[in-house]
Amino acid sequence: MVITAAGVGAGLALGAKALDETGKTISALEKIMPYILTQPPAAAAELASVIKEVMKAPEVVNLAVDALLGVIDEEKPRLVTLARVGDGSLVKNVEELRPHCHQISTIANRHLSQWFKRPSDADAEELNVILTTLAGADGSFFSQLVVFAGQIQDVATKAATLAMQGKQTEALALLARAAPALFAARKQANELALQLTVVQTKFRRRALGLPPE
């Protein structure tokens, strides 16, 4: 089977989509930051916990990308070792380490609901919509991170098979076709991680009683 650049890019696009949808949701949260920062410090602390869970999204993307491309960081890449990436363990790790909606739901239901149940308050309603979106993301964008990891496993398996057949050049060419989509996903993941860090810092400052920066 020949894996084309277009095929690789399409298969890995779900990772970018998951990060994009996460970023849009966090951007919506940033828009109501002035409202959030007037709420009790305990509410900000709980929201910081929500962000901590969401931060796992860019972390698992970087984990998956490094699992595949880390092998080329040697003078003489041992591409046969990619067989370990394609053995199913990567998908399992990403499934375990990605954001899980029940964690977000637990946080929201445990404390946040007591502060943000004012139907007449547009910002409170928007926050509830955002938390509901994140709490239901297992069925949308967070689960796509596992599919993304599965696509990386497929590329790793194919590259390892080529290397075992003595086709080192073809194996490297396959990684080269996958690389642009992976580099883009990693850049996007790091941008999202920075966005999440800025938001979490604002929540933590409020939780500590510190003024906004």
Image: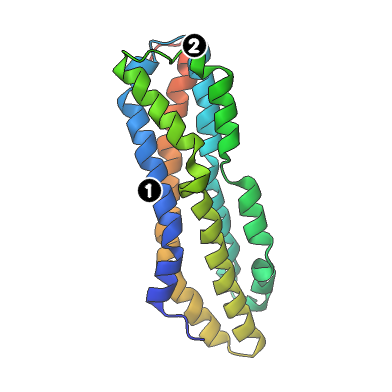
| Residue closer to the observer: 79 or 178 | 178
Q: Secondary structure at mark 1?
A: helix
Q: CA distance from mark 2 to mark 1?
A: 29 Å
* 183 on left or right of 111: left
Q: Residue at x 55, y 17 (%)?
A: 111
| Residue closer to the observer: 132 or 158 | 132
* 204 on left or right of 97: left
**Crowding near the residue tagged with mark 2, few <14, some 14–19, many ≥20 C-alpha atoms within 10 Å:** some
Mark earlier in primary sequence (2, 1)? 1
| Residue closer to the observer: 73 or 148 | 148
Where residue 23 sits, quadrant-wise, is: top left
Q: Amino acid at mark 2?
A: Pro
Residue, far bottom: 166
Q: Residue at x 63, y 79 (%)?
A: 160
**Crowding near the residue tagged with mark 1, few <14, some 14–19, many ≥20 C-alpha atoms within 10 Å:** some
* Label ID, residue 41: 2
Q: Is residue 111 above or below residue 156?
A: above
Q: Is residue 187 visible?
A: no
Residue, far front: 119
Q: Secondary structure at mark 2?
A: helix
Q: Position of residue 199 (x, y in %)?
A: 42, 28
Q: Position of residue 168 (x, y in %)?
A: 58, 85
**Residue denoted by label 1:** 20
Q: Is residue 53 above or below residue 208?
A: below
Q: Residue at x 39, y 15 (%)?
A: 37
Q: Amino acid at mark 1?
A: Asp
Quadrant (top left/top right/bottom left/bottom right) for the C terminus: top left
Q: Position of residue 209 (x, y in %)?
A: 48, 9
